[in-house]
Amino acid sequence: MARPIFIAPSILASDFARLADEVAAVERAGADFLHIDVMDGHFVPNLTIGPPIVAALRKVTKLPLDVHLMITNADAFIAEFAEAGADYLTVHVEACPHLHRTVQAIKERGVKAGVTLNPATSLSTIEEILPEVDLVLIMSVNPGFGGQKFITSCLQKTASARAMIDRIGSRALLEVDGGVKIDNAAQVLAAGADVLVAGSAIFSSPDYAATIAAMRAAGQPSSTTPQRVSAHR
Ligand code: DX5
Ligand code: ZN
């Protein structure tokens, strides 16, 4: 049976002056999650949003809030983001020296725990924590900015992550973030992704519903490219 496909618009590319309207628009357009990029100007060279915005968004949408923490000291902010209404809190393995403790702290707050890796970080860094997590996020750009080009080698990494998740019978969602567009969605989904994050592809398009529908349709067997990426792990 085909796996469900989830589309997660990243609000980083939305019009912040009209944030509530933008969120309502992607919700109407068929989004499954709302992806919220939290950056601290330290782990990544950009500053974005914090818990007050997450709390404000919680009041205006029913979409699950998929909060991607690109911050150095995630442990210090877990409680605040949980109280703000995050449904998923995803932390970077590069920023969390005590990743097991961090993941447990997220789950103890009743929030689903995700782990993510930069493009140059080996998948082996999540092997031990994998049974504990609800989501694995493969970064397909170096985090910090929207609108960057998809790093093609991340397709193979996505396929390898799919194989790792399936091998242990984990129900963790596999999400891919960065440079995902209508024209590479089929490859990303064929590599085994469950969730596509898309910022500029959705918010820069004239018709959010059509873009989301096209990304979802890219997961249908007829749309997948013949050169399927296979796992070799
Ligand atoms: C990058 C962020 C992404 C970004 C995606 O650091 O984690 O979520 O907003 O934007 P696009 O889809 O434009 O690459
Ligand atoms: Zn993100």
Image: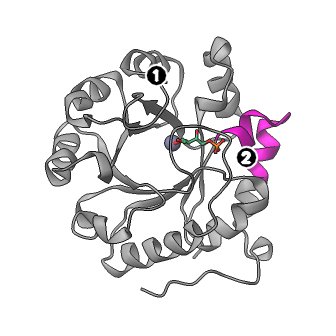
Distance from the alpha carbon under mark 2 to that under mark 1: 24 Å
x and y percentages locating residue 194 in the rendered image:
54, 61
Residue nearest the observer in this picture, 193 or 97:
97
Residue 195 drawn in magenta:
no
Q: Mark 2 points at which residue?
A: 212
Of helix, strand and loop, which mostly describes the magenta segment? helix
Give the residues drawn in magenta, as a range. 199-214
Q: Which of marks 2 and 1 is in front?
A: 1
Residue at x-position 81% and y-position 37%:
205
Residue nearest the observer in this picture, 219 or 142:
142
Q: Does 189 sit left or right of 129 as displayed?
A: right
Q: Quadrant of residue 72?
A: top left
Q: Name the residue under label 1.
A: 49
Q: Could you tell which of marks 2 and 1 lies nearer the N-terminus? A: 1
x and y percentages locating residue 147 in the rendered image:
68, 41
Label 2 sits on what residue type?
Answer: Ile
Label 1 sits on what residue type?
Answer: Ile
